[in-house]
């Protein structure tokens, strides 16, 4: 196959991927107090990876990101479920949140909550599932 001279496309895609990934992290972090969280943060992350798939090639991106996305989805589901079961251990309903304040050296007084762990699990499950589906659709075999 003839290699196209698509320097501009690849350069713009690199910049766009960095912007999308930064926005994805912002969506994830802001999800505790504002709209966002693990689901939409995970989908934005997937959008960045799909852009890489379109610009480069699925095989080339897979070589640089050697992750089994099915395993990533399973780990995400397990994290979410175990976070929910954590409340049941203390006699509370499933998915009961535990939170408190911690004094961190750089950030000062910071709220820590188990909802963040749940959102991490959701994000990993969304990323793993979405990329597994997209890669299976894009598979030529």
Image (tube, rainbow, N blue to C red):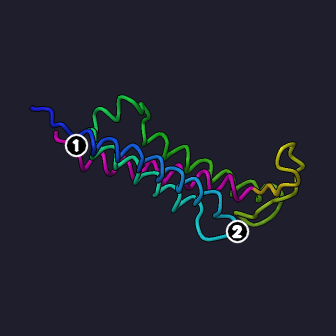
Q: Position of residue 59 (x, y in %)?
A: 28, 33
* Residue 92, magenta (yes or no): no
Left or right, 122 with respect to 127, comes to right
Query: Residue drawn at (30%, 45%), measured in percent from left and top?
Result: 135
Residue closest to the eye, 117 or 24: 24
Q: Residue furthest left?
A: 1
Q: Position of residue 118 (x, y in %)?
A: 65, 56
Q: Does 123 appear above or below 72?
A: below
Residue that carries the numbered disc 1 in the rendered image: 139
Which residues lie in the magenta part? Answer: 114-141
Query: Residue drawn at (57%, 58%), measured in percent from left and top?
Result: 38
Q: What secondary structure is marked by label 1?
A: loop
Residue closest to the eye, 67 or 22: 22
Q: CA distance from mark 2 to mark 1?
A: 39 Å
**Quarter assignment of residue 119:** bottom right
Q: Earlier in the sequence, mark 2 or mark 1?
A: 2
Q: Position of residue 27 (x, y in %)?
A: 57, 60
Q: Judge depth for marks 2 and 1 and give the one in front.
A: 2
Instruction: Report the magenta stretch's main SS.
Output: helix
Left or right, 49 with respect to 59, comes to right
Residue closest to the eye, 109 or 130: 109
Judge the density around disc 2: few (<14), some (14-19), many (≥20) Cα neighbours within 10 Å.
few
**Quarter assignment of residue 26:** bottom right
Q: Position of residue 133 (x, y in %)?
A: 33, 51
Query: Residue drawn at (42%, 52%), measured in percent from left and top?
Result: 46
- Of the numbered discs in the image, which one, if any, rests on residue 33? 2
* Residue 129, magenta (yes or no): yes
């Amino acid at each position: 196959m003839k290699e196209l001279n698509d320097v501009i496309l690849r350069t713009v895609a690199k910049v766009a991927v960095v912007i999308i990934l930064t926005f994805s992290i912002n969506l994830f972090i802001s999800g505790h107090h504002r709209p966002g969280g693990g689901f939409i943060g995970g989908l934005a992350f997937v959008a960045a990876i799909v852009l890489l798939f379109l610009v480069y090639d699925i095989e080339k991106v897979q070589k640089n990101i050697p992750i089994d996305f099915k395993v990533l989805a399973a780990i995400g589901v397990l994290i979410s479920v175990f976070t929910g079961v954590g409340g049941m251990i203390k006699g509370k309903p499933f998915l009961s949140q535990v939170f408190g304040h911690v004094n961190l050296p750089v950030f000062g007084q910071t709220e820590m909550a188990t909802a963040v762990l749940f959102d991490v699990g959701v994000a990993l499950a969304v990323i793993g599932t979405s990329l597994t589906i997209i890669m299976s659709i894009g598979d030529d075999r």
